[in-house]
Amino acid sequence: MTNIQTAEVPLSRKKRFLFFGITLLFPFLLLILLELLLRLLGWCAPEPLVRREKRFGKMYYVVNSEVSRRYFSLGDMVPEAAEDYFEVKKSPETFRVFCLGGSTTAGFPYEINATFPFQLKFRLQHAVKNYRVEVINLGISAVNSYTVLDLMPEILELQPDLLLIYMGHNEFYGAYGVGSTQRMGTNRNLILFYLKLQRFHLTQLVRQTVNAIRRALAPRQNPASTTLMEAMVKDQEIPLDSPKFRLARENFRRNLEDIIQEARAQRVKVVLSTLVCNLRDQEPFVSGFSPGASASLKQRWENLFAE
């Protein structure tokens, strides 16, 4: 008997590189195929800002009341946007205003005809005679500048003439705030990257699956006993001028700058409103010890305060 030995022919450098590249790309190709399949089937689509509907014989954009589901994972406790509507075909005589912000813009706790966008519409119609004024309320409770910045591309596609922005009070505890339960860390670039991923159907599939598992495992809460903002608060105290305080302020500033820059690139005017406040010279709600305070000093203070 004779032994037949086969010698392995080594792969060329080009073939090894090609094999290694295909191996690395294969998972990404699978993800792309899954994304295309989900889009083809219409499953797990991200909530749009507006939907098209035919009303009174015309096509209208209607604000999607559930667009906020992009930013919240609180089960049924999700704030809704007002279903304002406006014509798809904008006439030259139309002056279109979008009001952006949180619960104050949305109108909480008043009825729809008491919101400031609603009042603004009638005042502008009375003052501006040569235009048909549209004022669309895009206010959503418990959102902050991250949400407005994320919605900007879709808002600008709707041909606004003016953006009126009234926000700043939810930067700590609104969606993706530094002290919020609805957050993705505190790094601004990471948060913005995550918000861009939300536009993919595959991301929505993963998000919906995680939320379903979380709801199945978490104890049921009585929604009547918990308000939305109570559910949003993770850090009960954020010390004045602390790292988290400064980070929230800096992120707010940068988000506003990006919002204004995107609007200016489309030649859209922006009005930024300062927040109404009747707490002039109000001290922080809670006093705190300095970081270097000793345990004995804290105990002594507690005893004096109790006395």
Image (cartoon, grey):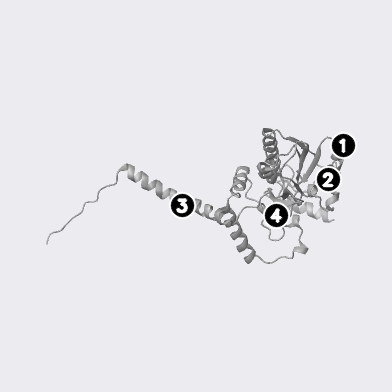
Question: Which residue is label 4 attached to?
Answer: 66
- The crowding category of the residue bearing disc 3, from other C-alpha atoms within 10 Å (few below 14, some 14 to 19, many at least 20), is few
Mark number displayed over residue 116: 2
Quadrant containing the C terminus in the rendered view: bottom right
> Where's residue 14, x and y in %?
33, 42
Nearer the observer: mark 4 or 1; the answer is 1
> Where's residue 68, x and y in %?
69, 52
Badge 2 vs badge 1, beta-carbon distance below 8 Å: no
Q: Residue at x 71, y 65 (%)?
A: 221
In the depicted view, which residue is nearer to us: 199 or 224? 199
Question: Which residue is label 3 attached to?
Answer: 27
> Where's residue 17, x and y in %?
36, 44
Q: List the single residue furthest toward the front.
A: 57
Badge 1 vs badge 3, beta-carbon distance below 8 Å: no
Q: Which amino acid does label 4 sit on?
A: Glu
Instruction: Choose the circle earlier in sequence order: 4 or 3.
Output: 3
Q: Which amino acid does label 2 sit on?
A: Phe
Mark number displayed over residue 127: 1
Real-space Cα distance between discs 1 and 3? 59 Å
